[in-house]
Image: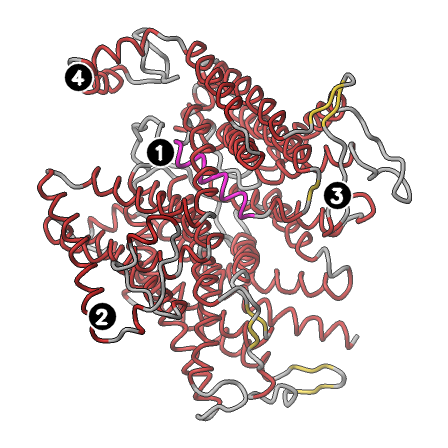
Amino acid sequence: MTEFIQTIVNGLTTGCLYALIALGYTMVYGVLKLLNFAHGDVYMVGAFIGYFVMHWFGGPTAIVIPVPLLLLIMFAVASIGCGLLGVAMERFAYRPLRDAPRIAPLITALGISFMLENTVLLLFGGFTRSYQTESFVSISSGIHLGGVTIDTVQIMIIVVSLLMMLGLQQIVHRTTLGKSMRAVASDREAAEMLGINVNRTIALTFFIGSAMAGVAGVMSGLAFDQITNTIGFLAGLKAFTAAVVGGIGSVPGAMIGGIVIGLCESFSLSYISTEYSDLIVFGILILVMLVRPQGIFGRPPLQKV
Amino acid sequence: MSEAADDSPSIGVDQWVARSGDRRDQGSGWRKLLGQAESRIGWWQRLALVTLFGLIVGQLLNNVNVQTVAFNSLLYAILSLGLNIAVGWAGLLDLGYIAFFGFGAYGYAVFSSTAFGSDGSGGAHLPAIESIPIVLVAAGIVGAIIGLIALRLSGDYLAIVTLFVGQAFMEVVNNVDPGTLGGVNGLYGLDPLHSFGGKIESPLGFYYLALIITAALAAIMHLLDTSRTGRAWRALRDDPLAAAAMTIPVKKLKVMAFSFGAIVGALAGTLFAAQQDTVFPTNFTANVLILIYACLVLGGVGSIAGAIMGGLVVTIGEQMLSSPNDAGYLFYGLILIALVVRIRPWRKLGAVLAGVLAIGFAAHGIVSAISSSAVAGSPGSGGWIGSALRDYVIVPANPATYGNILYVVLICALVAIVRLHGNRRLLAVIPTVYIAACCWESRLIVNPSITTQIMIGAILIVTMAARPQGLLGTARVETVQP
């Protein structure tokens, strides 16, 4: 029973991270109908930015400012850096291809993903870097209930993710920006005719999505300790699965999908096999595709002629 | 092998659009004569000429390394021909293609080694004439199954599911049954390609085999392309809904495209395994997939000649990049070609080139006057290029950090050039080329493998933005997306 609850806790934590990345996928897909393969690599860049910010402030063993402030700065810098990266990507790679055949931006996205991965490899080397979280955050002083432990980093991940998701929900449903995002998602041309600045809306969507991926990158660095230039590929793939399971284009769907994928992964890790956990996630994707292609929250797409 | 060359009306090509190209391209004088001569040669005559050329080239290759490169370039040509079926004709973004390549390689490997035996002896050891057809049929069936899954999915979903197929393949060969598939250590000590008592072992033999297979595939592809099925695929690509309304069997065609692509990919895999003598899981990573995509996209999605051309160009380019003496020709040659093609008229081009030279020597002079250690390093290029650039580029004694900064600056400068227009762009080109040269000599050429990957990524992005039809493809008239 203890192991069962612990597995749920672990699954929730990774699930929150997947959900944060999935939100970027789903938002971009919503407004542009574009699958941004490079999104997983934005997450990787976020993890690297967080790492270098931490080293800027003295490194894991000799941090010169209070730790909560450091974490806040790490999140802020990573989200702004990744957000700008996302905007640049949209502006220079995707915008010229907006009216191109569907396959063109996908190939561009592959190219961007490949370039980001190898640029980080060129600049920072291919070795594994360690956040060494335990030397500046007292991880073990979390919540202990019976045999179940929710450590500090896990609490932080869950709280920060929930806050960000709530914030995003507010942005999408309560602000003018959110309104224009929804308008662009439902019909770009009509939105443009009604005076919505489509380019600005799309750029901001990229900014918000990439910023969340950046925060997820920093948190995954804190939680899983090790980062390399290749962590983006698999994380991006699973986050995309989360977005699809929840129903791509739907914001609550991405959150639920992320948590579902996180739980599946953690259960298959502790109860079935460590080696096949990726295959199991893949199996879920196939199953969802076959049974309910529009996902849990998605509406079946209307095909316009 | 272009379709619009003959005058007979062809289905699927808008006549006016086709003719407008002719009107412009026909030109006058020797160009017209050459064009007329070209249009009289049929596709199979061209193919025979190219194959003959390939045979003659084979006679001239006397170095084992060069023979291997020649084989690899044909291997990638075959791979991009196979990818072209699903991606170029049927318009299905198949990111699991690498799994079929791997499937073919592993299939050949288990039938030609001790994999099925016990304690390192025994095993199937089938001759190639038996093992390769088995593997190809199996690949076709697996491809059809994945195609069946893909039926439910459109465009982007399909891409990600097939990407997962590639990932799943890696998981399977790494983890499932290490006794048979070798796990991370792969399979080694495969039999040479043998049948009917004869066998192929030398790189040159494999080159000729690959040449024959490429030529045969090109012929099959051409027949397929101009067949009813080929036309139906293109209809499916351009508008699936309209194709379905025209009673084209969309589902069957999608499964066929996957299946055919899988067979060609697996064929390339068997060749690869036989030539390498070993297979490792790392031969089939996403990097290789993107390399194949780069071949196809550069050559021209949907074009047979383009797919072959792309395979040759990318593989030879990759090989040139890994040698410090040759990489310079490729890099500076590309810059020069880009400048010559893009900058008109000639006097502006002259001014830009003069500016590029002047700014370099001036910057080198100024920096060396300020601090001699800032120019203490030597260019990464070897040969005469390296010595010619010694007093041109600024390379400090320890160039790693400096090169990294330059790389970031270079990316920013390239992005800025896209935004500028007219004379400002010309002005911005001058320092950018110089930064590129400095960055190249101090950082990029020192890490040829990473540089190759970055350039492959750049090929994908730049081709899609600047010339989506690739080198040899024909531009498609697109309907506006809903």
Q: Which residue in the protein does label 2 denote?
A: B367
Q: Amino acid at mark 1?
A: Gly
Q: Secondary structure at mark 1?
A: loop
| C-alpha gap between disc 4 and disc 1 | 23 Å
Q: CA distance from mark 3 to mark 4?
A: 57 Å
Residues marked 1 and 2 touching at CB (< 8 Å)? no
Q: Which numbered dot is residue B187?
A: 3
Residue at image coords 55%, 33%: B63
Mark 3, other Cα within 10 Å: few <14 / some 14–19 / many ≥20 = many
Kindly identify the residue that appears in the image at 52 percent across and 31 percent down.
Answer: B70
Which of the two discs, 1 and 3, sits closer to the camera?
Answer: 3
Sequence-earlier tag: 4 or 1: 4
Q: Nearer the viewer, mark 1 or mark 2?
A: 2
Q: Which mark is residue B301?
A: none
Residue to which mark 1 is pinned? B470
Q: Position of residue A278 (x, y in %)?
A: 66, 55
The answer to whether residue B247 shows anywhere in this view is no
Rounded to the nearest whole Å, what is the CA distance between mark 2 and mark 4? 51 Å
* Chain bearing mark 2: B
Mark 1–mark 2 Cα distance, whole angstroms, equals 41 Å
Identify the image quadrant of residue A133: bottom right
The answer to whether marks 1 and 3 sit on the same chain is yes
> Share a chain, discs 1 and 2?
yes
From the image, tell me which residue sits under label 4.
B27
Above or below, B270 against B381 in this view is above
Circle 2/circle 4 CB separation < 8 Å: no
User: Is residue B154 rendered magenta in the image?
Assistant: no
Q: Is residue B298 magenta?
A: yes
Q: Position of residue A109 (x, y in %)?
A: 41, 49
